[in-house]
């Protein structure tokens, strides 16, 4: 796991520490109907995980570490 600050582009000064995995495995479907599995690491894993959260309607705040 890695913990870094994330925020929203619409609120530049609002940020929170968000833990995310260092590796993420993503399964997608190609135009040929073939299932493709890819593994992403570090910064790209964080970015993809963040964007997948948006697809599910989640902002960073539910994942924010509230210690």
Image (tube, rainbow, N blue to C red):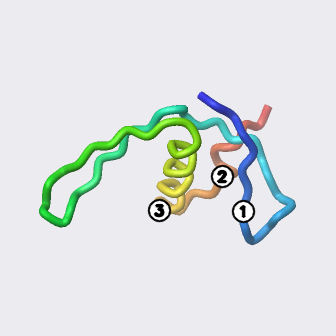
- Mark 3 and mark 1 in contact? Answer it, CB < 8 Å: no
Q: Residue at x 72, y 37 (%)?
A: 65
Q: Residue 55 at x, y = what percent? A: 47, 62
- CA separation in Å, label 2 and label 3: 12 Å
Quarter of the image containing the C terminus? top right
Q: Residue at x 13, y 63 (%)?
A: 32
- CA separation in Å, label 3 and label 1: 15 Å
- Mark 2 and mark 3 in contact? Answer it, CB < 8 Å: no
Q: Residue 39 at x, y = what percent? A: 37, 38
Q: Residue at x 53, y 46 (%)?
A: 44
Q: Residue 11 at x, y = what percent? A: 80, 67
> Would residue 4 be found to the left or right of residue 48 on screen?
right
Secondary structure of the residue carrying numbered label 1:
strand
Q: Residue at x 66, y 52 (%)?
A: 60
* Furthest-top residue in this view: 1
- At label 1, counting other C-alpha atoms closer than 10 Å, the crowd grade (few under 14, some 14-19, many 20 or more) is few
Point out the tag, 3 or 1, that comes first from the N-terminus.
1
Quarter of the image containing the N terminus? top right
Q: Which residue is mark 3?
A: 55
- Mark 1 and mark 2 in contact? Answer it, CB < 8 Å: yes
Q: Which residue is mark 1?
A: 8
Secondary structure of the residue carrying numbered label 3:
helix
Task: Report the disc number at residue 49.
Answer: none
Task: Report the disc number at residue 60.
Answer: 2
Q: Is residue 6 above or below residue 1?
A: below
Q: Residue 5 at x, y = what percent? A: 75, 45
Secondary structure of the residue carrying numbered label 2:
loop
- CA separation in Å, label 1 and label 2: 8 Å
Point out the tag, 1 or 2, that comes first from the N-terminus.
1
Q: Quadrant of residue 46?
A: top right
Q: Is residue 62 above or below residue 56?
A: above
> Which is more toward the observer, 47 or 58?
47
């Amino acid at each position: 796991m890695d913990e870094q600050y994330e925020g929203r582009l619409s609120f530049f000064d609002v940020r929170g520490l968000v833990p995310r995995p260092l590796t993420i495995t993503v399964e997608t479907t190609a135009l040929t109907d073939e299932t493709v599995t890819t593994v992403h690491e570090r910064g790209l894993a964080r970015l993809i995980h963040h964007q997948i959260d948006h697809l599910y309607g989640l902002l960073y705040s539910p994942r924010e570490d509230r210690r």
